[in-house]
Image (tube, grey):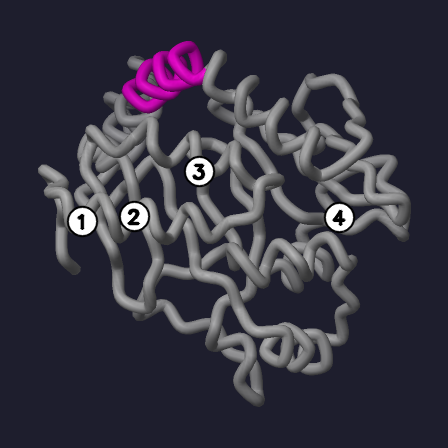
Amino acid sequence: MNFWLKCDEEQMTNLDSWLEKLPSEYEPISDLTRQFVPGGVDEDEGGMILAGHEPTRGPQAYAVTLFPGLTSRAIQRYEVLNDLTLPATVKAFLGHVNGAFLCELSLYGIPPSMIDNPPMLSRSTRNPYDIATANHYWRAGFERVEPTEFYIGGRNVSWSGQIGYFIRDDGSIVSYPKRGTDFPITTWPSFEVWLNDELNRMMTHRPAFLEENEIEGRKADRRYFRQKLLPWNWYRWLR
């Protein structure tokens, strides 16, 4: 890794070049990434972009991670190997950005090792969440999802709450709350409108989300201490 804690002119040019190649409909992703440049930028192996170093969450944690796009041939091979048909909108996106972590919002992609035969997930490098696994298995965690709706990503809306994003045949996007999450179902007419609205909504609520996570994280640490580190008879009186 080549960590750019203080970006010089050449490094900013590299970042801008990466982002400027994105079509206009993905401009909200470029805008979000640039917001986190003051927090540091990293260009990982394989050409992925990381912005906004957040060491309080982990030594290698970043607010934004963008994976470089894939060729149409690689995407087609992935579909065959994983018995999956990707919507046209998703294919177009993966050709430019092969998945992304945008603060609390994740867009699923294709881990490069899942294009191999047999497909096997490699944990030796950063990967997007696997879109085939999401549609074969993870979608079962959502109620009222139609079989034709394709699972493209999700967002953490609270310490334990999550919503999933699904694209319909007409190109519209709908969000469903995961089981146990109290959140309204919402629809958008297109991928572009959805991306802009949800990134803005996420950033508006992010301070409260991070504060809640910090509080709940401390509670979880205390519960772990009581359950695992104290003798059982002590824990019985402290819980």
Q: Amino acid at mark 2?
A: Leu
Q: Earlier in the sequence, mark 4 or mark 1?
A: 1
Residue at screen point 22% across, 49% down: 42
Please name the residue that numbered disc 2 is placed on: 15
Please name the residue that numbered disc 3 is placed on: 30
Mark 3, mark 4: which one is toward the viewer? 3
Please name the residue that numbered disc 1 is placed on: 11
Q: CA distance from mark 4 to mark 1?
A: 43 Å
Q: CA distance from mark 2 to mark 4?
A: 38 Å
Helix, strand or loop for disc 3: helix
Q: Quadrant of residue 51?
A: top left
Mark 4, mark 1: which one is toward the viewer? 1
Q: Quadrant of residue 175?
A: top right
Q: Looking at the image, is 19 positioned above or below residue 121? A: above
Q: CA distance from mark 3 to mark 2?
A: 10 Å
Q: Earlier in the sequence, mark 2 or mark 4?
A: 2
Please name the residue that numbered disc 4 is placed on: 140
Q: Looking at the image, is 5 positioned above or below residue 11? A: above
Q: Is residue 9 left or right of residue 178?
A: left
Q: Mark 2 and mark 1 in contact (Cβ < 8 Å)?
A: yes
Q: CA distance from mark 3 to mark 4?
A: 32 Å
Mark 2, mark 4: which one is toward the viewer? 2
